[in-house]
Image: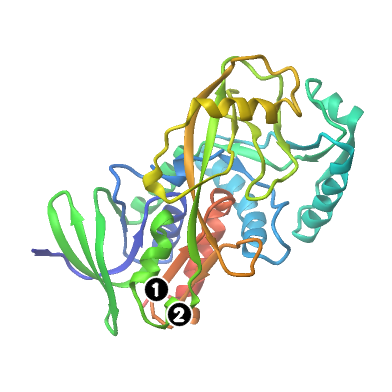
Amino acid sequence: MSKVPDIQSVVIGAGVVGLACAAALADSGREVLVLERNAAIGEETSARNSEVIHAGIYYPPGSAKARLCVDGKARLYAYCAARGVPAARIGKLIVATRAEDAATLSALVARGADNGVNDLELLDRAAALDLEPALSCHAALLSPSTGIVDSHQLMLALQGDLESLGGVVSTHSTLRAIATDSDGTLLTIDTAEGEMVLRAREVVNCSGHEAVALAWSLGGAQRRDLPEAYYARGNYFRLAGTAPFSRLIYPVPEPGGLGIHLTLDLAGNARFGPDVEPVEGPAAGYAVDPARADRFSASIRQYWPDLPDNVLQPDYAGIRPKIRRPGVEVADFEIHGPDRHGVKGLVHCLGIESPGLTSCLAIADAVVSLLGEPA
């Protein structure tokens, strides 16, 4: 067994949140190593989402999701502009296709204002159709600060920041065992070169699908304060052809998600999704069942009745690392630091699903704050 020197900070997981945390830790003067089990960065949740920069409308006021999304949105637009990461503030319409859904739009305006989102505009049918003539709706809510980002280029920029500060991303590095003691955290890792053991003074758990299980494996009193992990696959279909929309189009929210919405990428290509398909875990895989296209078409035609037949093609799927607690209806991000579990130098990022991409820079700042000044 080879042994590497002790290291100050280890981040587990090289998705967008892990890379943002690693870059922020390195910027604070720390020596940072990122462990990634896959062959490349960002191959799981960070690569399998809508690539939307969210405004911060949906989340309960005062929640971590609300605070970190609104702060993260501003930070992310500025970061992308400074680093040359492709991003565009194209706006979004949330549409009420029935008169009885109009009250939901008004409630979203109020919730958005409570969260610090003050640019929302209620539109009647005529005003909405002036913006998007192909739309069918009773009313709509315009969110001009919603946008899209190239998530892969964002992750490459974060990796570049990390590496420019001396940090390292180690791919093909799978965590096999972890244990804490008074001297830090001992990690046993399988790498392409074989097994290695290292000791870290700080560990940040950004392992996405595995984050709750990793936290649970450390045992101790912290287990009593951990949420339950569960998973939902979100399927996407791409549109064969060009969509007659210039903005993102969302239905009113549905239980478990934001509904099957239209997103546009930076090349103008359209995709629809995600739906909400409960699965046992990541082992369920990412295959998209073409038969789901009928359900997608029915949902889409509520706001785009002229969707042609047979134009939806299976695209990709993502699996959301969701969490829940008994009696809690809406799960929040949970970032557990030493003040919560009592283990010095350890932070768990749990339930980081949407709006995790939007919030990544704000989450990173929260993690650095929980760890305090570098030792």
Type of residue at label 1? Leu
| Residue 319 location (% of width, % of height) | 47, 45
Which of the 4 image quadrants contains residue 157?
top left
- Alpha carbon distance from label 1 to label 2: 9 Å
| Front in this rendered view, residue 11 or 176 | 176
| Front in this rendered view, residue 101 or 75 | 101
Q: Are marks 1 and 2 in contact (CB under 8 Å)?
A: yes
Tag on residue 341?
Answer: 2
At numbered mark 2, what does the secondary structure look like: helix, strand or loop? helix
For the N terminus, the quadrant is bottom left
Identify the residue at horizontal 71%, vertical 30% (top origin).
247
The answer, for residue 114, to whether it is visible in the render is: yes
| Residue 313 location (% of width, % of height) | 52, 21
Identify the residue at horizontal 81%, vertical 26% (top origin).
136
Type of residue at label 2? His
Label 2, residues with CA under 10 Å away: few <14, some 14-19, many ≥20: some
Label 1, residues with CA under 10 Å away: few <14, some 14-19, many ≥20: many
For the C terminus, the quadrant is bottom left
Tag on residue 346?
Answer: 1
Q: Is residue 132 above or below residue 42?
A: above
